[in-house]
Amino acid sequence: MVTKGMWWQNEGGWNLVELNVTLLLITLLAGLAYPAFAGWAERVERELFLGTLAADIRMAQREAMAMEQEVSLTFDAQNGSYHILRGSERIRQGRIPARLQVESNYPSDQILFRRTGQTRGGTLLVRSQREVVGKIVIQVASGRPRVEVAP
């Protein structure tokens, strides 16, 4: 039984205005959230690359000490990669993400680890469209890398 004061109890679904308002709110929230997530994905990619590069630097140092031979890490900007070499033997090859560039203050873009694991200190700058987005500072005597990610 339907009474005059309870008209809303007869409605079984949503009307067109309610659906449009709901879709508008969902679209608005998605539009506001997208830029934050897009920036987040780029930051994660940078952090992963910097972490991987720092781990490869430590690996090159350990390899030099374990094999008692010089080991070098060389950057190849043309191909977007870097190589870890023991003599002429390639131990490992890493890829630099397409939107990132690596600059170093090392001669010939080459980090050389002596048989003792020591290396010359220096800095690797990671840029994205000319803006520094991170860097790896390699300590002078110890050769240990320290990663800094720009916010």
Image: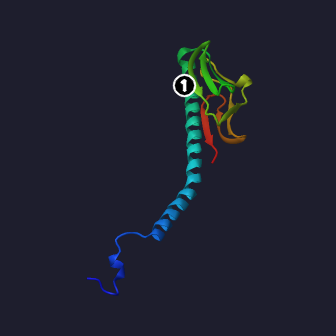
| In the displayed structure image, the side of residue 88 where residue 13 appears, left or right | left
Specify the farthest residue to the top. 88
Element assignment for label 1: helix
At 55% across and 20% down in the image, what residue appears?
63
Quadrant for residue 69, please give it: top right
The one of 22 and 30 positioned closer to us in this rendering: 22
Spot occupied by residue 135 in the image (x, y as percentages of width and height): 65, 38
Mark 1 belongs to which amino acid? Answer: Met
Residue in the image at 67% along x and 30% along y: 140
Q: Is residue 96 above or below residue 7?
A: above
Q: Is residue 5 above or below residue 91?
A: below
Outermost bottom residue: 4
Which residue is rendered at x = 59% and y = 43% of the image?
42
**Which residue is tagged 1?**
59
Q: Quadrant of the N terminus?
A: bottom left
Q: Depth check: 91 or 67 in front?
A: 91
Coloured how? rainbow
The answer to whether 16 is drawn above or below residue 121 in the figure is below
Please identify the quarter of the rendering in which residue 136 is found. Answer: top right
The image position of residue 14, as x and y in percent, is: 40, 69
Instruction: Please rate how many residues cluster around mark 1, counting C-alpha atoms within 10 Å: few if below 14, some from 14 to 19, many from 20.
Output: some
Percent of width and height locating residue 129: 70, 40
